[in-house]
Image (cartoon, helix red, strand yellow):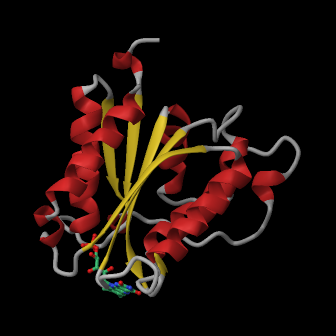
């Protein structure tokens, strides 16, 4: 398989379209595109993604998938098609953003849409306002991702995270931006 055929899907989990996690995601996209991948970004805050209703329809024998009729119905095929996912989220109240969590919970239904739906490379990008990744809750959020993706058998290829409060502040951390770009290259391989 050539690099050209790799598809990277980015889930932007912040309400801030030009926020810090989105900037990190942009650098990941830059690296992935430079390595020949096709990249698509979804600003999930602007989408209709309802909370999982725990109906278990998606887990039933001969299921046709998730019973909730919202924008996840168009996201499921994109998730299945992609070779790699990037989840970009700010830390909100010591964990991932609510937008990110809504999306993550709904991935429970993915097994209904394709074989080995989690055989993906995963990249994580996070930003937080505190100066310390532990007290900010960033490590807590990362741990949530690690447990989730270990549970479904997906491989986290890399995690980039940094401190930045106001939208755009992360751009000053040029080393982190470079790290994000490199992660993009890795995801495209
Ligand atoms: C509702 C809300 C909750 C937040 N909670 C935390 C937090 O628990 N820990 C922290 O370090 N920063 C917190 N922040 C700051 C953001 O994590 C920080 O500004 C981050 O860079 C935002 O990323 P974004 O620009 O991609 O949205 C919070 C911000 C908001 C709006």
- Can residue 68 be seen? no
Whether residue 81 is situated above or below residue 170 in the rendered picture: above
Image height check: is 40 above or below 81?
A: below
Residue farthest right in this picture: 61
Q: Position of residue 155 (x, y in %)?
A: 59, 43
Q: Where the C terminus falls, by quadrant?
A: top left
The residue positioned 49% from the left and 32% from the top of the image is 83
Image point (21%, 65%), residue name: 17
Residue 179 lies, in percent from the top left, at 28, 48
Left or right: where 63 falls relative to 95: right
Residue 175 % position (x, y): 20, 54
* Residue 176 visible to an observer of this rendering: yes
Q: Residue at x 32, y 33 (%)?
A: 185
Q: Quadrant of residue 111?
A: top right
Q: Identify which residue, 153 or 64, lies in the foreground.
A: 153
Camera-side residue of 82 and 45: 82
Q: Position of residue 184 (x, y in %)?
A: 32, 39
């Amino acid at each position: 398989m050539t690099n050209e055929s790799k598809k990277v899907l980015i889930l932007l989990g912040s309400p801030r379209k030009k926020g810090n996690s989105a900037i990190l995601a942009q650098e990941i996209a830059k690296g992935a595109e430079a390595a020949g991948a096709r990249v698509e970004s979804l600003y999930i805050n602007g989408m209709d993604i309802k909370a999982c209703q725990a109906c278990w329809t998606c887990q039933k024998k001969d299921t046709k998938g998730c019973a909730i009729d919202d924008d996840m119905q168009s996201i499921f095929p994109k998730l299945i098609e992609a070779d790699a996912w990037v989840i970009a989220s700010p830390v909100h109240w010591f964990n991932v953003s609510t937008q990110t969590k809504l999306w993550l919970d709904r991935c429970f239904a993915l097994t209904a849409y394709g074989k080995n739906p989690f055989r993906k490379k995963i990249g994580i990008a996070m930003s937080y306002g505190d100066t310390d990744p532990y007290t900010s809750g960033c490590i807590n959020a990362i741990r949530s991702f690690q447990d989730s993706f270990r549970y479904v058998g997906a491989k986290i290829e890399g995690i980039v995270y940094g401190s930045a409060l106001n939208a755009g502040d992360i751009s000053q951390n040029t080393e982190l931006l470079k790290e994000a770009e490199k992660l993009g290259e890795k995801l495209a391989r």
